[in-house]
Amino acid sequence: MPAIRTWLKSPLAIFTANDIDARGGLVIEDGLISECLALGQQPSTPCQHVFDAREHVVLPGLINTHHHFYQTLTRAWAPVVNQPLFPWLTTLYPVWARLTAEQLALASRVAMAELLLSGCTTAADHHYLFPQGLDEAIDVQVEVVRELGMRAMLTRGSMSLGQAEGGLPPQQTVQRGEVILADSQRLVQRYHERGAGAQVQIALAPCSPFSVTSEIMRASAELAASLDVRLHTHLAETLDEEAFCLRRFALRTVDYLDSVGWLGPRTWLAHGIHFNEQEITRLGAAGTGICHCPTSNMRLASGICPSLELEQAGAPLGLGVDGSASNDASNLLLEARQALYLQRLRYGAEQITPHRVLGWATRGSAQLLGRDDIGRLEVGKQADLALFRLDELRFSGSHDPLAALLLCAADRADRVMIGGQWRVIDGQIEGLDVQGLIADHRQAAARLIAG
């Protein structure tokens, strides 16, 4: 039986992330892009379905490379609204330590639904909280990923350096190294999918220099190499972190990363703000990736990622929304807008263009996750697409549709396709009771805070 072919015809504008002319639209077949049509070009053979995209701006599905789904339960919590990272964390840790499997499922569903509605098709989550009773946190998240039909890189995070040993986290949130490594291996063997079209992948992600031991960093790097999976952590987010590394290890952050075997192309780092020129050169030479999280960096007053220097040195650069208690949203298109404006403060308007930033949110983010099957619109890539309409009042009078997405603050996709299947239609997630989810999630958030 021949495969069903769908033509997304004549979009208002299209960003392919690779300069291919696809103004005539895309042909989708077996979940893949089978043709990119130039303006005026027709499909090579008839298509059973034609979607008229003349009122839509088409992007590759956006890719979020750093998040903490569970934090949707502690958004805009008054005690931490005006705190920088370290006191923000120490105030929130005891609250997060009460997290249950049911609350995590709700939090993950909310985060992923919000991402999906913003045009995001692939998300990386950094989950490092495993209090008593939540040993199978990543298993809980896998079920939510499959339910919503998104792609995800679920990172098995960890904290092993508690306050008693000089770290930041309270003791009830840390785990022994052997427990962390055994569960990491279990998750990779059970869930990690390889090759084009993978839906669920697993990475290893000790949380940060101030919450894990050097031993678990080294062991995680060795295990990741043996299992051929990626590595992720927070690094160089704040000057407090830099001071911690100098005090505890007598090393700056990149030297510490190198000392535990993490400086290489398998690794991508969240934030990457406080690097000197030599460190940027070393990161680029190693092919270590950086996830820029502009909203969180502004919210916590952490600093501005040196994006262009990192790119010029050879370090892959992508975007992430970070946790929903330091953003406090899960909207990747709005994150791209923040990246545009924050990076213009550092580099000027001429260098930081909408095309460049959309490239970070698609092609660059895919590179951070080690994927070449998503993030671009070209023949053979996964049919992961985000379609936006420009018919709201905020867009009236705009002239450049691609620029208008960011400059006029588009925040919700009209349609989202993943692997050739529509997951969002007319701004609604197929099969999800959003109002019911909000009600359940609000109750869970109130219970978590109340203790």
Image (cartoon, grey):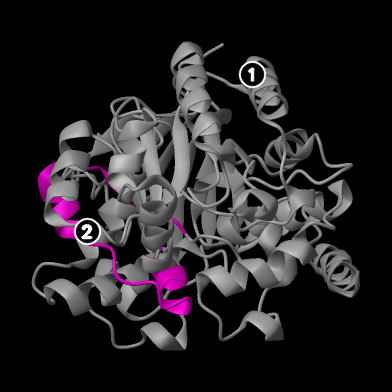
Image quadrant occupied by the C terminus: bottom right
Q: How many marks?
A: 2
Q: Earlier in the sequence, mark 2 or mark 1?
A: 1
Percent x, y of residue 431: 77, 50
Q: Nearer the viewer, residue 43 or 124?
A: 124
State the residue position of label 1.
185
Residue 31 horizontal side relative to residue 353, left or right: right
Kind of residue sitting beneath label 1: Gln
Q: Nearer the viewer, residue 35 or 226?
A: 226
Disc 2 on helix, strand or loop?
Answer: helix
Q: Amino acid at mark 2?
A: Ser
Q: Residue at x 12, y 49 (%)?
A: 278
Q: Is residue 31 left or right of residue 401?
A: right
Separation of disc 2 and disc 1 at Cα?
Answer: 33 Å
- The range drawn in magenta is 292-320
Residue 324: percent from left, percent from top: 61, 66
> Which of these two is toward me, 438 or 303?
303
Q: Give the label on residue 307, or none.
A: 2
- Give the image quarter of residue 393: bottom left
